[in-house]
Image (cartoon, grey):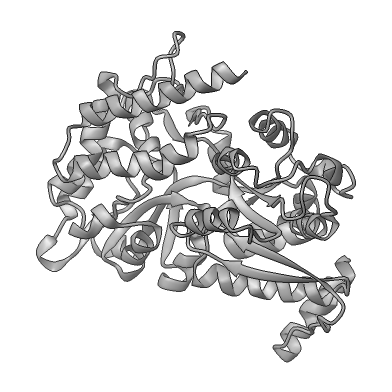
Amino acid sequence: MKKLLALVLAAVLLCGVIPVASAEGRETIEFWFHASSETTNANYEELFQILNSIQDEYEFVYTGFASANFPDAMNMAIATDTMPDVISTGFSNVTNWTAQDALIDMSDYFEKFEEKDAIDKTLLESLRNIGGGALYGVPYNYNQDMIWYNTKLFAENGIENAPATISEFMEMCEKYADPSNGKYFYSLRGVKPGDNLIGFIFTYADNGGEYFDENGKCVLSQPKFVEGLELYASLYKNGWVSGDSVNNNYNEMVAEFGAGTSMMIMHNSSSRANHEKNLGIGNFSAARPLANDESGNFYTSSIQPTLFAICKTKGEDGDYSGAAKLVEYLTSAEYVVWQSLHFGRIPVNSKAYDQAYDELVANDPFLVLYNELINDPHYKQAQNPYYLPGWFNFVNTELTNGFQAILTGEKTAQQVTEEWCAYLEGELASWQAAQ
C-alpha cells in the first residue's frame, strides 16, 4: 500500500491530476466530516481521490460540515434515516449519538484491523468506558490546545513573546486594544467557547481539574471559578475584543486572526492549516497556553481526540465491511501521517512516528512544542466528564447560552455557574442511576 500511495502522489506532482478508478460496480461509502473549512474540504477531497484510486471495491464519498452545522445535520439524518456510513466526531459527542442509537459497536471489525495494536490503548480504553464496554469508533489523532500569535504584528508592536500568564494576557489585551481602528490583541469566541473558556477558568482556579467534589457537587460555582469567568468576560465588557465576539464561532474567530484584526487566539493544533492559508507560513507561531500566576500550572480542556465512527444504517446485524474498510484506511499510519501533515493534528497510531517522524517534524515545526507541552509537569487537564449523556449538550448549548448571557449583562457569572452546576449535577445523578 505504501509503495502504491507513493506512485499515486508522484503522479499528482508530475501531472497535477489524481487517477480515479471508475465508480461502476462499487459500493458507495459516504463519509461526513464534522468540522470542515474550505481548507479541510479541499484536503479531504484530495485524500478521498487517493483512496478511491488505490482500490476498486468501494467508492468513498466525502462531505464536509462546519462544526456549527454538523449536529443539526446529523440529528436530521438520524430522524429521517438518511445517515452517512461513516462520520468523524469528538469523544465528547459519542454519548449524544449512541443515545440516539446511531452508531454501531466496532469491536469485532476493529479486531481485524492490521494496525489495531498501534492505536493508543489509553484512548481506546477511554472510548470503551464512554461506550459501556462497546467501541463506538476508532481514534486517529488528538488536538493540542495552545496559543497562536501573529509574529509580524508582534514585531510591529515590539512584543517579544506571547503572554505566559493570565495577568500578562489581560495586560496585553488592555494595552493593545484599539477599538477606533478595529484592532485588538485577542479574538474572543462567544459561540461554543468551551475549550478556551474551560482552559481559562480551570487555570485561574487551579483546582486539579475535577468538575465534582467527593460529594458529587459541581465545583464550577465556587468563588475562584466565578472570578475566572468574570475576568474572561471582562475582555468583552471592557471593549478589549471586537464587538462581534459575542457571536464569534470558530470560523469568525479564525477570520479575525487571519485578517489581522487580532494578534492572538487560543485554539488547538487543528487550525494551523487555516493560519497558513490566511497569514502565510512564517507569519505566525505557537506558544504554551496561559499559566496560573502563582503556581505556573496551565490547564487545557481534556485532550481532544477525534475518532471515526460507523453509523447504524443497516440495522443491528448488517454488513458494515465497507464502512470499516474506510475507517481502517483513515486510522492506518499511512493516512494518519497524511492527515497530520495537512491538518496539524497529532497521530495516535504509533506506527505513524515509526514511518515518518522526521517528515512530521520537518513539516510541522510545532510537533516538538506539542510533545513539550504534554510532558511539562505544570500541564494539567480539565477532566471533562465525557461519560455524561448530556455533556455534548452542555458544551455546545449550555456553555454558549450562559457565556453570552454574561457578556450581554443579562446574567451574572454567579447565576450562570450555578445553572451550569445544576445541569451537570443532574446529568451525574442520571448517569449514576443508570449504572
- Image coordinates for residue 275, horizontal then vertical, percent: 45, 65
Horizontal side of residue 180 vs 413, given as left or right: left
Q: Which image quarter: residue 431?
A: top right
The vertical placement of 355 against 219, above or below, is below
- Image coordinates for residue 49, horizontal then vertical, percent: 73, 76
User: Residue at 47% across / 72% down in the picture?
Assistant: 277
User: Residue at 83% across / 45% down in the picture?
Assistant: 110
The vertical placement of 277 against 214, above or below, is below
- Image coordinates for residue 61, horizontal then vertical, percent: 70, 71
Q: How many marks?
A: 0
User: Residue at 76% across / 53% down in the picture?
Assistant: 352
User: Residue at 42% across / 28% down in the picture?
Assistant: 297
420 or 145, which lies in front?
420
Name the outermost residue toward the bottom.
15
The vertical placement of 61 against 188, above or below, is below
Horizontal side of residue 217 vs 83, given as left or right: left
Horizontal side of residue 343 vs 411, given as left or right: right
- Image coordinates for residue 391, horizontal then vertical, percent: 48, 35
Horizontal side of residue 142 vs 198, given as left or right: right
Quadrant of the snapshot with the C terminus: top right
The vertical placement of 237 against 342, above or below, is above
Q: Which image quarter: residue 221?
A: top left
Can see residue 130? yes
149 or 67, which lies in front?
67
